[in-house]
Amino acid sequence: MTRYFSAKRAAWGVVDYPSRIRAPSFLRALARGETVVLLVDRNFSKRGVRARFFGMETLVPGGHVVLALRSGAPLLPCCSYYAEGGRVEGVIGPPVETGDPPRSLEAIVSACLERIEEFVRAHPDQWFAFDHLWREADDA
């Protein structure tokens, strides 16, 4: 599946980065003025930032915020969804403010999640949560 989707992305000019070199590759891409798109509502590791998402605490990634702070790149929340006629439409929201001086990592992550919540509320039938985000809360 990974190879299949990587080939589909490559056909559209989208670059997949191997996990072992992502952060340095992302910083170089941002320095060149390229766009880096990251999934921020799923945590695929044991590390992350504790934040409230849809009113419940969960562990989410914080790397997007670290990259923005280190590179100076704006944090632009975005989503895509299926529209009429089978079209895929993308929405890019206004930048999430990091502050000057920067707010805490947790505060910026929370601000990003608030934007993601807005997107999901606009199209709840199109948010695909393949894994349970609040598993730890269920296990408690």
Image (cartoon, grey):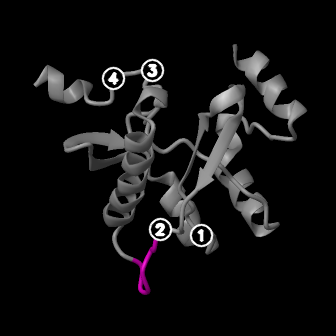
Q: Which residue is mark 4?
A: 132
Above/below status of 110 relative to 103: above
Q: Which residue is mark 3?
A: 130
Q: Outermost residue, front direction?
A: 84
Of the numbered discs 2 and 4, the one sitting upstream in the chain is 2
Type of amino acid under label 2? Val
State the SS at label 2: loop
Above/below status of 28 relative to 82: below
Q: Which residue is mark 2?
A: 96
Q: Do labels 1 and 2 touch, CB within 8 Å?
A: yes
The image quadrant that residue 10 belongs to is top right
Q: Residue at x 42, y 57 (%)?
A: 112
Q: Dot 3: within a 10 Å radius of its alpha carbon, few (fewer than 14), some, or many (20 or more) residues?
A: few
Q: Is residue 106 left or right of residue 4?
A: left
Q: Dot 4: within a 10 Å radius of its alpha carbon, few (fewer than 14), some, or many (20 or more) residues?
A: few
| Pick the front one: 126 or 140 | 126
Type of amino acid under label 1? Pro
Does 98 appear in magenta?
yes
Q: Do labels 4 and 3 touch, CB within 8 Å?
A: no
Type of amino acid under label 4? His
Of the numbered discs 1 and 2, the one sitting upstream in the chain is 1
Q: Position of residue 115 (x, y in %)?
A: 42, 55
Q: Outermost residue, bottom direction?
A: 100
Q: Which residue is mark 1?
A: 74
Magenta stretch, residue numbers:
97-102
Task: Determine the CA span between mark 4 and mark 3.
Answer: 7 Å
Task: Determine the CA span between mark 2 and mark 4.
Answer: 26 Å
Of the numbered discs 2 and 3, the one sitting upstream in the chain is 2
Q: Residue at x 74, y 52 (%)?
A: 25
Above/below status of 107 relative to 39: below
Task: Determine the CA span between mark 4 and mark 1.
Answer: 29 Å
Q: Is residue 84 left or right of residue 7?
A: left
